[in-house]
Amino acid sequence: MPGPLTALEPAPGGGLLRFARSELSVRVTARGALFLGWDSAAPLPSYALSGAEAVAPDARVVLEPDTEGGVRLVSERLGLTVARDGTVEVRTPGGVVLRRQSPPRWWEATGSVRGGGRWVSRAEVAADAVFLGAGRDGAVLAEGAYTVGGVRPGLRMPVQVVQADAGCHLVFHDAEEEGEWRLRPGQEGAGSGHDRAGVAELRMSGGPVRSWVVVGSPQRLAYGWASLTGAPVPPPGDVLGGRGRDTVLVRGGGGPAAVEELPAVGRPRRLGGGAGRDAGPGVPQWRDREVRAREGERYVEFARQGRHGFVHSFEGMGGVLELCRARAVFNSLRGAFPGERPLQLAAGVWAGQQRYGGVCLPGPAAGDWAELPRVVGRVLGLGLCGVPFCGPGAPEVAGGAPGRRGEEARASEVRASAEDEEWGVRWEQLTGWLPWSAETGGGDTGGARSGGRERWAPYWTTLARHAGLWGGPWVRPVWWFTPEDRALRGVGDAFLVGEALLVAPVCAPGARSRRVRLPRGQWYDTVTEVVYEGERTVEIAAPFDRVPVLVRAGAVVPVREAGGTVLEVWAPLPESGPGTGLYIPDEGEGWSPPLVERYTSRRGADGAVVVERSGGPGAGPQGTADVERPVRVRGLEATEPVGPA
């Protein structure tokens, strides 16, 4: 263990704390993120961070002595105290403790290189706190052990968001070695009325003991995380609009070598094979600069054959190797085709993946209803970890059932076939509202599903371009704007798309309506225009031919019509007050700076809906002032808001 504190060396942004057997480096960046590095661990070099500018210190912040032999600092975004024994407390600017981190413990062989041993770091959070992240079963991380780091693909990024009444914070342990996060949520009133704190214990096989903490609202966490690891790169516009493009699924470790047609659910997929390499079966040494350049050129050659989309599924790769591969492919494709946006998705993920592309999650087992909310949760979790462009691959179809005989067996098969068909319809309805899926972004989608997605294309591209300015997921938990609402924390089968829309997919067979907890405000059904009151649970219609989609009263939403983009305005209600909306025009390709158009809606003195182009400060330059958009107002005939179910 570090031992007692012996000296303080203040520096811009924080300083260095010397203990009897270790040192702790503390730095608050100019954009409000907190770095903690033990045993001489520094912020850089790091594969996850976007560069030196991301870690520039806030010169206004300096460590200073505190009571009882410790030190403290206070910044605009957070507070910090370090006790004499090395215990770290992260606080809100007002002094409320969000996280209490015990000093780390190391195990090192005698005579080994310092910092080469395994280590453990244990933190406590509030009893009401919820752990969130890119979990295998969803965004909410239940009690249990979660593998992080290592070389295997999957959702193994050591990032978690902690949500509590006192506030939210994000933690990232920047160590790529394999480890295990052991989580135990807290309990209020446990044991004679006393609260039991939540616990997050990280056990690592090695690597630096360094971490980052961002404190604030969910939007603030998204911006702070993007300022560290980079803003999400916008994908090609045709993918967001549902028109899709041919993609290649690359297996093995190298570049694509051969293409063959294999069946998948609903359509063929193009699959490429890769030759073996040298860092394990089929894995190139992607960390090496020359290897990255050489392998990247292989993708360029394949793209010249007409395939500009890549979905990677590499055995023996994950984490940092996936990030290095994504970087090599992105930079090579962008250099060879400067006017196009590369499309690539990885099976594994590491912090910073959003700088180069997205993530393709495993497809569910076809017909498994329990998988539908799990897919939603995985997409939400990746979005919270900074990767908004993600979604599931095609469903996996199990082998045929053993032979059955008799009328009863045939009737059972008919029922099973009908249920599988229903599952397929509900699956398509769900994936049409995710950032990406094999159905909406991997090729020819056709039909009503594609047409519905194409109508909302201006809204999707606005979300993608806005994320490039401020960070943040496109698909968000329903509590995103009201994290203090405890009733929304457990909602895992509904989600927000941007600020305006709420999607409530059907996740059970035979359902023709469903219950959903709504955030604050008033919400229109986008088809029936029925209005529902927020902050309560309501019953909404869910007929077989559509997924329930609600829109916030007052929202200004760009949609695509035959004549171009139209601003669809959902009439503000007296209870809802003024509304807002953004539109960021996008050509679908290229890298021109986004031009932001901001709009407000309100009721005039005569009750008419007034839509105005607003100026003022915002993310990025304002759009061209003389552009006039056609406006359609909806919800004018709406009745009084529907109460709770």
Image (spheres, grey):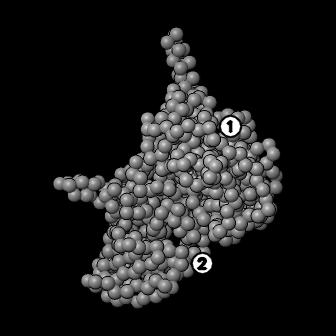
Q: Amino acid at mark 1?
A: Arg
Considering only vertical position in the picture, is 374 above or below 322? above
**Is residue 163 toward the left or the right of residue 547 in the image?**
left
Q: Residue furthest front?
A: 606
Label 1 secondary element: helix
Of the two numbered discs 2 and 1 in the rendering, the one whose residue sits closer to the viewer: 1
Q: Residue at x 54, y 25 (%)?
A: 419
| In-front residue for pair 243/181 | 243
Quarter of the picture holding the N terminus: bottom left
Q: Which residue is mark 1?
A: 449
Q: Residue at x 75, y 61 (%)?
A: 333
**Circle on res. 53:** 2
Residue 635, how many percent across, how many down?
Answer: 62, 41
**Circle on res. 486:** none
* Quarter where residue 343 is shown: bottom right
Quarter of the picture holding the C terminus: top left
Residue 222, how many percent across, how many down?
Answer: 54, 63
Q: Residue at x 34, y 83 (%)?
A: 71
Mark yes or no: residue 15 visible: no
Badge 1: how crowded within 10 Å, few (<14), some, or many (20+)? some
Q: Residue at x 61, y 56 (%)?
A: 580
Badge 2: how crowded within 10 Å, few (<14), some, or many (20+)? few
Mark yes or no: residue 335 visible: yes
Considering only vertical position in the picture, is 207 above or below 240? below
**Is residue 193 toward the left or the right of residue 75 in the image?**
left
Considering only vertical position in the picture, is 526 above or below 335? above
- Dot 2 or dot 1: first in sequence order is 2
